[in-house]
Image (tube, grey):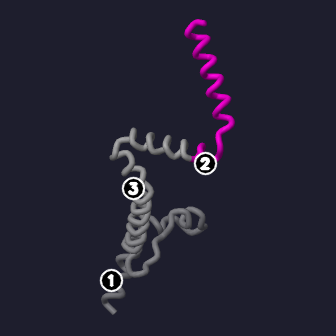
């Protein structure tokens, strides 16, 4: 019997024996395997796996809060901004919107004077 035949015979016998193992033995083997695999991973990698979901949550909260506070800065004092879509979709004369800054200044001057 040569080496290859011997290895095939041993592999076949081991495979047959593992098919007849009990649930408790399989569970212990799985736990041992997981523990061995965990020791192979570097410590930093294990920490990264634990902190990755938490850091994603923190990033989402920060982004949400930034956009919430920033939206208040975009439209100060409750003023309504003019949407470009509304301007384009309306049938109004576009010349009015070309000089909109002048009309806004005129309105502010009238409010501050009166």
Would you say residue 102 sits in the magenta stretch? no
SS of the residue at dot 2? helix
18 relative to 69, above or below: above
Q: Nearer the viewer, mark 2 or mark 1?
A: 2
x 48%, y 70%: residue: 82
Mark 2 Cα-neighbour bin, 10 Å: few <14, some 14–19, many ≥20: few
Q: Main secondary structure of the magenta part?
A: helix
* Quarter placement of the C terminus: bottom left
Chain part drawn in magenta: 1-27
Q: Which comes before the other along the chain, label 2 or label 1?
A: 2
Q: Which mark is residue 51?
A: 3
Is residue 100 visible to the viewer in this orientation of the structure? no
Would you say residue 26 sits in the magenta stretch? yes
Instruction: Give the quadrant of residue 71.
Output: bottom left
91 relative to 1, above or below: below
Task: Determine whether, in the image, residue 64 is placed left or right of residue 28.
Answer: left
Measured in 3D between alpha carbons, the distance from the residue under mark 3 to the one under mark 1, in whole angstroms, is 56 Å
Return the residue nearer the eye: 59 or 10: 10
Residue 69 x/y as whole percent: 38, 72
Residue 57 x/y as whole percent: 44, 62
Q: Nearer the viewer, mark 2 or mark 3?
A: 2
Q: Which mark is residue 24?
A: 2
* Residue farthest along the left direction in this orientation: 113
Measured in 3D between alpha carbons, the distance from the residue under mark 2 to the one under mark 1, in whole angstroms, is 86 Å
Q: Which comes before the other along the chain, label 2 or label 3?
A: 2
Q: Are marks 3 and 1 in contact (CB under 8 Å)?
A: no
Measured in 3D between alpha carbons, the distance from the residue under mark 2 to the one under mark 3, in whole angstroms, is 33 Å
Task: Return the residue at label 1.
Answer: 109
């Amino acid at each position: 019997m040569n080496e290859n035949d011997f290895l095939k015979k041993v592999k076949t016998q081991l495979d047959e024996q593992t098919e007849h193992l009990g649930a408790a033995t399989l569970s212990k083997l799985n736990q041992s395997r997981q523990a061995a695999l965990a020791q192979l991973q570097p410590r930093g990698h294990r920490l990264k796996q634990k902190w990755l979901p938490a850091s994603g949550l923190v990033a989402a909260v920060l982004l949400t809060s930034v956009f919430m506070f920033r939206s208040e800065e975009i439209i100060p004092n409750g003023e309504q901004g003019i949407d470009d879509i509304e301007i384009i979709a309306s049938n109004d004369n576009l010349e009015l919107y070309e000089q909109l800054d002048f009309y806004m200044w005129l309105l502010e001057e009238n409010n501050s004077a009166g």
